Image (spheres, rainbow, N blue to C red):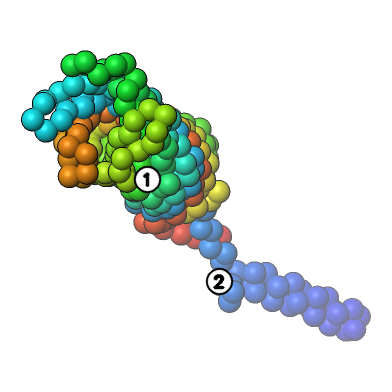
Amino acid sequence: MIRKFSMATAVLMAASASAFAADLPRRTPPPVFVPPPLFTWTGLYVGGQVGYAWGKDNSNGVLSAVGVGPFGAYTNYNSPNGEVGGAHIGYNYQFNQFVIGVEGDVNGSNFNNGGTGFAFGAAGIPFGAFSVNTATRIPIEGSARARIGFAWDHWLFFATGGAAFADIEHSFALGVAGVGFFNDPATYSKTRVGWTVGGGVEYALNNNWSVRAEYRYSDYGTNSSATLGGITALTGVYGTQSSHLTESKVQVGFSYKFDWYTPPAPVVAKY
């Protein structure tokens, strides 16, 4: 009987100890839940791009001679083209599914081409007596634009537009049809300001990196006429020229967005 009473007492004490231990505070810290950062297009970003450009440069000019004045006119149609590549910087702000922002870019390029036309004769000089070679080149170009887009998960579909800038070089050579040119091309350059519009799509690989593809059309307007120097000293003939340059461009690129997002405070599980 005593043995049975001792065993019952031991079992009761063990059960009481287990219940008491269950009421003691845990020695290990409870798990901490940190929500993953929410993706947003908001932020400052930088990146690079490469692409291909093609365009039209319609040139109109007047030929003049020292002591004679204007004696002919010409029209040339150039189709310059070439590769472009450079860098961009911008800032986006997202609210709901809409994204607005600003962006600037600069590209170096080998965009160039030339063409030959014939002068319309005047003052007794027959039609086509002179041949004129003109060429167009853009070594550097850039833009400052606004962007507006619609975000769908990690995709951003956007339109863009603003001001376009280009350092445009024109060259001019004059000759006699069927004979040859009198001089090496005379070159003049001018920074032109125009407008550009386009659109594209961008995909965010994560909170920082994204890739993009876009198309843009730029119009640099009509260049004011300029005396094409270097011809008078050689031949006594010189020219003035105006041109209207437009450009289409497709580009692909990447961007890195600086992540200034601050996640909410950790949620600590309670027991």
Of 197 and 264, nearer the camera is 197
Of 264 and 119, nearer the camera is 119
CA distance separating discs 2 and 1:
36 Å
> Which image quadrant: the N terminus?
bottom right
Of 217 and 176, nearer the camera is 176
Regarding mark 2 in the picture, which secondary structure is present there? loop
Occupied quadrant, residue 225: top left
Residue occupying the point 17% across, 37% down:
236
Q: Is residue 73 left or right of residue 32?
A: left
> Which image quadrant: the C terminus?
bottom right
Q: Is residue 122 left or right of residue 45?
A: left
Q: On screen, 60 above or below 135?
A: above
Residue occupying the point 31% across, 40% down:
182
Q: On screen, 40 above or below 257?
A: above
Query: What is the crowding at mark 1: few (fewer than 14 residues within 10 Å), some, or many (at least 20)?
Result: some
For disc 1, the marked residue is: 42
Residue occupying the point 26% across, 44% down:
187
For disc 2, the marked residue is: 29
Query: What is the crowding at mark 2: few (fewer than 14 residues within 10 Å), some, or many (at least 20)?
Result: few
